[in-house]
Amino acid sequence: MIWEIAYIIIYAVYVYTICVTIFFMLVENRNPVKSIAWILVLVFLPILGFLFYILVGRKFRKRHMISKRSLLINKKSNTIDLTELPSLELTDEQRSIATLAFRNSDAMLHENNAVTIFTKATDLYDNIIADLKGAKHHIHMEYYIFLADKIGQRIMDVLKEKAQEGVIVRVIIDDVGSWQLKKKKILELQEAGIEIKSFLEVGLPYINSRVNYRNHRKIIVVDGLIGYTGGFNIADRYVEGLSWGCWRDTHIRLEGSAVLGLQKNFLTDWFFVKRELIQDALYYPAQEKKGNCLTQIVISGPDMVWESIMQIFAKAFMEAKKRIYVESPYFLPPESLITALQTAALSGIDVRLILPKKSDAKITLYSTFSYIDQMLKAGIKVYMYDPGFIHSKIVITDDISFIGSANMDFRSFEQNFELNAIMYDTEVAQQMTDIFMDDVNHSVEITKETWTTRSLTQKVKESFSRLLSPLL
């Protein structure tokens, strides 16, 4: 009898807790698709669903993020604000996107940049190491994944050497992405004179509120003159691949005033992790003309008013006149982007997607597959990369190129701290297009006829994963 009463009390408390949780989730006025998905999880996965919601479902309140972006000085070295846009030789499409990026994320336009594109990990890491060795004043690095494996140790050894020479070395790692980087290794780097901080440390009692918001940005700045960003992290998998194939990614090296955009965002994140405001002009040196590429550095994150990168992609898809080419390892787009891609394809624009055939995450792979039918029906060409896992995150719309850390999914647009470079340059767009077409040549095209013949088991897996896609 006592056990029955205890069971009834526990059950009543649980039901009450679930009802209260659903009530507060609804009054937050979230995306209704996400709200419905969470309600289904809470109702049909008792206890487990509630624990999952506590872990990754709650909103991290923006006022707790305390972004101090406005405290940092905007240095005016080859930097263009919104009032100067009319004087630039831009197409209407480019001007529209540049205006949006300025207004939704304070992304200044940077002139006279040189862009080098990397698709091979060995070439990229060799260049990074050479640039790090040449540092005279400071090195800033920010990575989601930074491991102490073979390539990671090579880079760490260089960082320690430079720190001992008197170069200022600051490193930000994501606490979840770099969880394999042991405390002992971090202490070793600190003892060598390197300042290294974790972004949103996930330790008790904070695990409930912080684990769902990760810093996914990839930034290197050397002396304020050389910068890197893109999709590569620091790990051997990018060189050695996986047991079932290569790991394909894309990254860029920047010289010119766009490096100041990377610098500003690194120092903003540094303020967040250490509460140290760095405004010294030495970090914003005068820039020589290195090339002709006009560039914006755009960020997004849960501390911002707008879902800036998602808005920019939507605008670019709607403004495109000739082509839209997208590579993404995780393709779980919101309805706005689905509609924009379908509308573009139905209006005669060449729209193509390269997606992974295999992935490092099964549930996101099947969720990605669940969107393919909608793409094919609109006439979008869909390819699956065959040699291994494609982790590249590039978009080309006409003569505009996008590269960075953001995937084409809910998490990147709403929850992660992301950074992308927008390049308004015909030559760079052509280089990106050539890379995309080379990946097409190593991919298998999916047709409506072949896609409809996939097994019922796969369709069920896709449908179930699609249901969870707003939560991934």
Image (cartoon, rainbow, N blue to C red):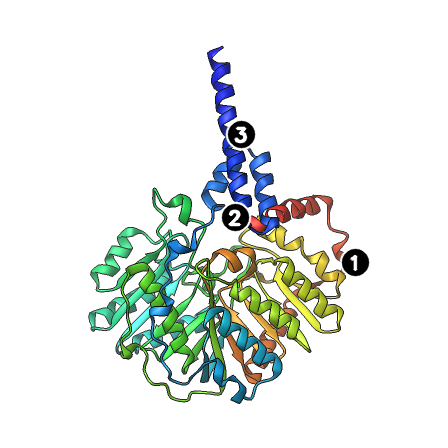
Give 36 or 216, whichever is nearer the viewer. Answer: 36
Judge the density around disc 3: few (<14), some (14-19), many (≥20) Cα neighbours within 10 Å: some
- The mark that comes first in sequence, 2 or 1, is 2
What amino acid type should be assigned to the residue bearing mark 3?
A: Val
Q: Residue furthest front?
A: 27
Judge the density around disc 2: few (<14), some (14-19), many (≥20) Cα neighbours within 10 Å: few
Element at label 3: helix
Using the rendered image of the protein, determine whether residue 320 is visible from the camera's viewpoint: yes
Element at label 1: helix
Q: In which quarter of the view is residue 372 placed?
A: bottom right
Left or right of 408 in this view: 305: left
Residue with the mark numbered 1: 449
Residue with the mark numbered 2: 28
Against 242, residue 3 (above or below) is above
Q: Which mark is residue 15?
A: 3
Q: State the residue at coordinates (48%, 55%).
A: 415
What amino acid type should be assigned to the residue bearing mark 2?
A: Glu
User: Which numbered disc, 1 or 3, marks the residue closer to the eye?
Assistant: 3
What amino acid type should be assigned to the residue bearing mark 1?
A: Glu
Spatial CA span between label 1 and label 3 = 47 Å
- The mark that comes first in sequence, 1 or 3, is 3
Q: Where's residue 452, x and y in %?
A: 77, 53
Give 182 or 346, whichever is nearer the viewer. Answer: 346
Spatial CA span between label 2 and label 1 = 43 Å
